[in-house]
Image (spheres, rainbow, N blue to C red):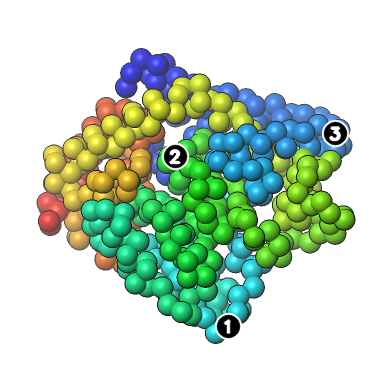
Amino acid sequence: MNASLADVRTAMLLDPTVTNLNTGSFGPLPRPVFDRATELRHRLAEEPMDFLIRQMPPLLWQARVRLAEFVGTEPKRLVFTANVSAAINIVAAGLRLNAPGEILLTDHEYLAMQWCWERMAQRHGLTLRTFPLPANPSTPEEIVAAAVRAFRPQTRLFFFSHVLSPTGMALPARDLCREARRRGILTVVDGAHALAMLPLNLDEIGADFYASNCHKWLLAPTGSGFLWIGPGNEDRLEPLHVSWGYQRPAPPWDEPDAFGSTPRIRFYEFEGTRDLCPWLAVPAAIDFQKAIGWGAIRTYNLELAQYVRHRLGNDLGLPAVTPSHSALHGFLTAFRLPPRTEPMGLRDNLWKRHRIEIPIVERPDCLLARVSTHFYNTEAQIDHLAAALAENLQERGRPES
């Protein structure tokens, strides 16, 4: 770790007794982001009416503008949500698709989101189908070709993750959306891990709907996410909640209003009284990592991901399932564990005996250890994980290749 990153690591609210290699699930907070969210909540607590009616709207619009700049789009396209699951549910519950037809997913999607689309399919008389992604693709084109082979005339919607949660493989989102669009297929992208991990320009990706979390790699407070609505889709959804944004005034609907949104955004976003402070603190999270330098963070994180491959792959002999092609991975690296490994036992071992936080992912065909590498992690922490896994492997035998 270079000096600047080593210094800024002290600004992270991290338990010093824990080796946290799980930003992919939840990002810890930097002190300035925590302080900003706390300041906002203090204002809300001491005078709710003044905060929610007078102070909050300009702050909300500012947060929307800053996030839009960061992800390469216009603020009028961003609907703040609590997380990706909430955003995807807005689409799945509010979209109307013609039956008969099918919803297409990859075979690596987050299970809760698969359930979301299963419910939509049942409600609309559609079928749900998954297709296998290439196991070890060497180029992005292999993934695009697999999707194109899976498309059918009856495919109405294609849902996929920009970065796969189990393996950390990054999919070529722009090319996948382009091929789907050529065939008249709607695209909904789960970008839970993409924000602040991959260079992101939503206008260039060209999905119909794109959702992401701010509480992972961006290190914003829990409860901050968004839904991006692509051109031509602004009026295709019904909101999850009928509240004060439901009755829209006369056009224009995309101009900033008195509530920190636009009439069209408010239609989807407003749920009644709630704590918006996580959304309002998003600019502080952007500023924190911007001050470090996005280039420096990305370079270090990728170097650390390579060190993970060396220590767990070369030294321990665990097969990496995350592709090595630079376009197909970010800061998540997953390794296949021996078939005889008992997942609950390994989780307990790593946490109780070693105070290591990583997910053990149970796939239908294998068990994976997934390692996140953010700027606050170190090679020493990777060494600690490697030693703990080696101890576990010695107890249970070496992995099969």
Residue at the spot 68% in from the left edge and 58% down from the top edge: 234
Cα distance between the residues tagged 2 and 1? 37 Å
Cα distance between the residues tagged 3 and 2? 35 Å
For disc 1, the neighbor class at 10 Å (few under 14, some 14 to 19, many from 20) is few
Q: Which residue is mark 2?
A: 199
Q: Which residue is mark 3?
A: 54
Name the foreground residue: 194 vs 272. 194
Sequence-wise first label, 3 or 2: 3
Q: Which residue is mark 1?
A: 99
- Callout 3: SS: helix
Amino acid type for the residue under numbered disc 2: Pro
Amino acid type for the residue under numbered disc 3: Arg
For disc 3, the neighbor class at 10 Å (few under 14, some 14 to 19, many from 20) is few
182 displayed left or right of 314? right
Where on the picture, by quarter, is residue 302?
top left
Quadrant of image for the C terminus:
bottom left
233 displayed left or right of 47? left
Q: Is residue 217 something that shows in the picture?
A: no
Q: Check the image and report above or below for 159 versus 163.
A: below
Residue 231 position within the rendered picture, expressed as x and y whole percent measured from the top left: 62, 56
Residue 330 position within the rendered picture, expressed as x and y whole percent measured from the top left: 35, 42
- Callout 2: SS: loop
Quadrant of image for the N terminus:
top left
Q: Which mark is residue 280?
A: none
